Image: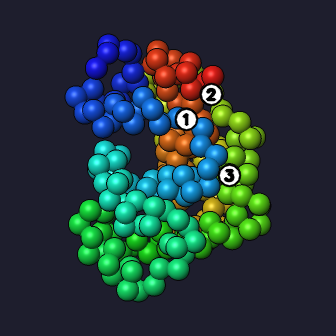
Amino acid sequence: MENKKRCEWVPLNDPLYVKYHDEEWGVPVHDDRLLFEALILDGAQAGLSWITILRRRENYRQAYDNFDPQKVARYGEEKIAQLLADAGIIRNRRKVESSVNNARVFLEIQKECASFDKYIWQFVGGKTKINRWESIKEMPATSPESEAMSKDLKKRGFKFAGPTICYAFMQAAGLINDHTVDCFRYREVMEL
């Protein structure tokens, strides 16, 4: 691995985490399916470390029909039972049931707003919000934007969409650039 300065939260001895940081985290996402995936995975992360979810992401993609919201919205009790028996994902009934519920709400938002992308990016005025953190110690767990997003998603019926989960989603999906200013990805992400 080349000797580049990265955000201090990245464990340099974990190639999966380094690859995620270097290639995905903070990159603006405008594809509805990928936005749905990020929301479901951030909800699954609640109370856990991100690496726990990242190591299971491929299992999630397989178990959740590649996060096709149309398919997930149609999951019934049989499919939920199958998911709860799948050791490759987090087998928490509330999280699994909320993912099905959230798929249904996601589709309603798509219908109402023409796309989920159009809806979700409104919380940052349609473009990535650039932060200038010197250290992760300065980085908040929530923001006014994540609080507004959480409030609106919950009002629409989303579960596992608190302000902290929404902030993590915003970081991952590039609604905000939270790479620290000394990280090599900070400028690269700004130019995307």
Horizontal relation, residue 131 to residue 55: left or right: right
Identify the residue at image location x=37%, y=63%: 62
Quarter in which the C terminus is drawn: top right
Q: Please tell me the numbered disc located at residue 117.
A: 3
Residue 131 can be seen, yes or no: no
Relative to 47, is 178 above or below?
above
For mark 2, give the secondary structure: loop
**Amino acid of disc 1:** Val
**Sequence order check, earlier mark of 3 and 1:** 1
- The image quarter containing residue 137 is top left
Question: Which amino acid is tagged 2?
Answer: Leu
Q: Is residue 2 above or below residue 27?
A: above
43 and 139: which is toward the camera = 43
- The answer to whether the residue labelled 3 contacts the one labelled 1, judged by CB atoms less than 8 Å apart, is no
Q: Is residue 81 left or right of residue 23?
A: left
Question: Image point 55% across, 43% down: which residue?
Answer: 173
Instruction: Give the spatial CA distance, label 2 vs label 3.
Output: 17 Å
**Quick one: SS at disc 3?**
helix
Q: Quadrant of residue 104?
A: bottom right
**CB atoms of marks 2 and 3 within 8 Å:** no
Quadrant where the image shows the N terminus: top left
Q: Which mark is residue 27?
A: 1
Who's the residue at 61% across and 24% down the image?
A: 190
User: Can you give x and y, in whole percent of width and height, for residue 144 in the image?
Assistant: 64, 43
In the figure, 27 relative to 131: above or below?
below
Which residue is identified by label 2?
Answer: 192
Q: CA distance from mark 3 to mark 1?
A: 14 Å
Q: Amino acid at mark 3?
A: Asp
Q: Where residue 78 sits: x, y (%)?
A: 37, 86
